[in-house]
Amino acid sequence: MGLFSKDIQTLQDLYIHQLQDVYYAEQQITKALPKMIEKATDPELRMGFETHLRETEGQIARLKRVFELEGLEPKGVTCPAIDGIIKEANEVAGEVADKAVLDAALTAAAQAVEHYEISRYGTLIAWADQLGRSQSAQLLGETLAEEKATDEKLTKLASSKVNAKAELAGA
């Protein structure tokens, strides 16, 4: 579906399309996180990725509830943005030999994913509110809060030790 597809005629259509987009994105994230867990060497980073994998599974379940509220079967549509973010993360991770630098790269990649999700969920909440879907907005808001909390944890981890270890690796 193109950016200005004839299939999207109303805000409701746009809202559903975006739900499908983020549903697909969350599915892709659950496939990418185990690889990130495997590659991470910092124990706190690894534990954070493991926690986020469980959270993402809960977020998918929450999205399924939103689809049910809309009277729809959950389904995704290809999201080139998340595919690109994950592809870039895999390429960068494949090029980094030093484990400390790899942890910094993985942290940055995870934050790119979080920022994408934060923007999508924020938009979905605004649209759900506009469409009078308060229950959906509440469910999406729970996910947005989790995404923001994960981003904050990643920022703290990066600035407190991961980036410093990466800097020392090159010294």
Image (cartoon, rainbow, N blue to C red):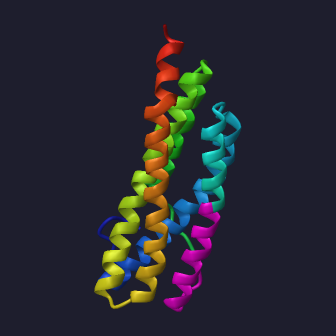
Q: Nearer the viewer, residue 5 or 137?
A: 137
Q: Is residue 80 left or right of residue 62?
A: left
* Segment colored magenta: 55-74
Residue at position x 47%, y 32% in the image: 160
Q: Which secondary structure type mostly characterizes the magenta part of the structure? A: helix
Residue plotted at (53% across, 23% down) = 101
Depth check, front residue: 155 or 63: 155
Q: How many marks?
A: 0
User: Does residue 23 show up magenta in the picture?
Assistant: no
Q: Residue at x 32, y 84 (%)?
A: 129
Whether residue 10 is visible to the viewer of this picture, yes or no, is no
Task: Tell me residue 139's x, y (percent).
Answer: 48, 79
Location of the N terminus by quadrant is: bottom left
Q: Residue at x 58, y 54 (%)?
A: 29
Relative placement, left or right, of 162 versus 134 is right
Q: Is residue 58 magenta?
A: yes
Is residue 74 found left or right of 125 in the rendered image? Answer: right
Residue 46 visible to the viewer: yes
Q: Is residue 21 above or below residue 63?
A: above
Residue 113: percent from the left, percent from the top?
Answer: 47, 50
Image vertical order of residue 91 relative to residue 126, above or below: above
Q: Nearer the viewer, residue 152 or 32?
A: 152
Q: Quadrant of residue 117?
A: bottom left
**Whole-percent x and y of residue 102?**
57, 27
Query: In the current view of this chain or complex, which residue is farthest to the front?
Result: 160
